[in-house]
Amino acid sequence: MDRGLRFISSMFKHDKLNLFLFVTLVGLQVLGIVALWTDFQWRYFPVMFAVYFFGGIGTTLYLHRYLTHRGFEMPAWLKFFCATSSAVVLSGDPVTWVGDHRYHHLKSDTDEDIHSPLHGFPYAHMMWLVRKPPEFRERSLRYAADVRKIWYCRLWERPYFYVLPHLTVAAILFFTFGFTGMLWSLYVPMLIIYNFTWAVNSICHMPRLGYRSFDTSDHSRNNLFIGVAAFGEGFHNNHHAQPRAAAHGHKWWEFDLTAWVLRLLEKCGLAWNVVWPTPAAKSGAGAASAVLLAEPSRQ
Ligand SMILES: [Zn+2]
Ligand SMILES: [Zn+2]
């Protein structure tokens, strides 16, 4: 009973609810769930796979490992392509995403952490997105001033520009496959991407639901299942120990799809200055262990 009440009250940690965003996030997931009661056709599968792969990689490779932690460099056209892929699945505008995530690294599992499960599982998983206190927006901007200098990231701070890549792809799929085909090929992969990405913030910071390879000051854990499903991001204790390292899977069985894509890009000359985990970094020293690329600019 007590646990149930705590679970519910944790959803209402802050007074204000961004009702529009809440309805949007629930609605997008409902579209993915509704699809499961409609007829699946194999011709949807290549598009489903492409949305899952490029949407996921856009989020992990671009928003997280490149833009937030600057773990490598890549050509401008590839940055734009990956950024657009993350926008197609509505992963979050880059300025807010980076600001929130850098702050999470600085305040992990303290009262100031934006999405620690210390505030309850629903809050850590999704509700933090729709219950952010207004001052968080201002703070995000301070920690992502470098991202704001990129023209499309600045443009996408306005929601009506940010939704354009998603609406374009949704319209193309609607006119190609019809409503059911659009649900299967776009909203089912988005449902999966959302929940595995959010699970990195919630489950991978919960005691007992994983293992720790590093004695970090936060509660981060490596979780094999989320690690594999979330393109390597679930090896989260490894990541907290060395945030700039572009590979989160360290052991041979910690399969990190994002790191393998990055290795391929590096071989093709499409990624360079990659901060790989090194023996020095693994002991907690070296460039890979730095949290931010620089002190946040004051505006
Ligand atoms: Zn974390
Ligand atoms: Zn990170």
Image (cartoon, rainbow, N blue to C red):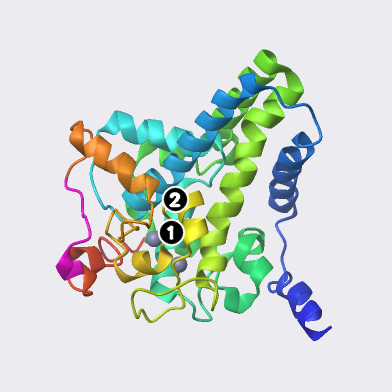
Task: Kindly identify the residue that appears in the image at 51 percent across and 72 percent down.
Answer: 205
Q: Position of residue 114 (x, y in %)?
A: 53, 69
Q: In this view, does 72 lie to the left or right of 126?
A: left
Q: Is residue 19 left or right of residue 126?
A: right
Quarter of the image holding residue 188? top right
Which secondary structure lies at badge 1?
helix
Q: In this view, does 3 lie to the left or right of 54?
A: right
Q: Is the magenta stretch mostly helix, strand or loop?
A: loop
Which secondary structure lies at badge 2?
helix
Range covered by the magenta-colored residues = 273-281
Residue behind mark 1: 99
**Does the magenta segment cover residue 256?**
no
Asked if the residues shown at circle 1 and circle 2 are in contact, with their CB atoms under 8 angstroms apart, the answer is yes
Q: As drawn, which residue projects farthest toward the right?
A: 1
**Mark 1 neighbour class, 10 Å CA radius: few under 14, some 14 to 19, many 20 or more:** many
Q: As drawn, which residue projects farthest toward the bottom?
A: 2
Task: Kindly identify the residue that appears in the image at 37 percent across and 33 percent down.
Answer: 80
Above or below residue 34? Residue 72 is below
Tell me the quarter of the image containing the N terminus.
bottom right
Q: Residue 122 has which mark?
A: none
Q: Which amino acid does label 1 sit on?
A: Gly
**Does the magenta segment cover residue 276?**
yes
Q: Is residue 3 left or right of residue 231?
A: right
Above or below residue 252? Residue 202 is below
Residue behind mark 2: 95
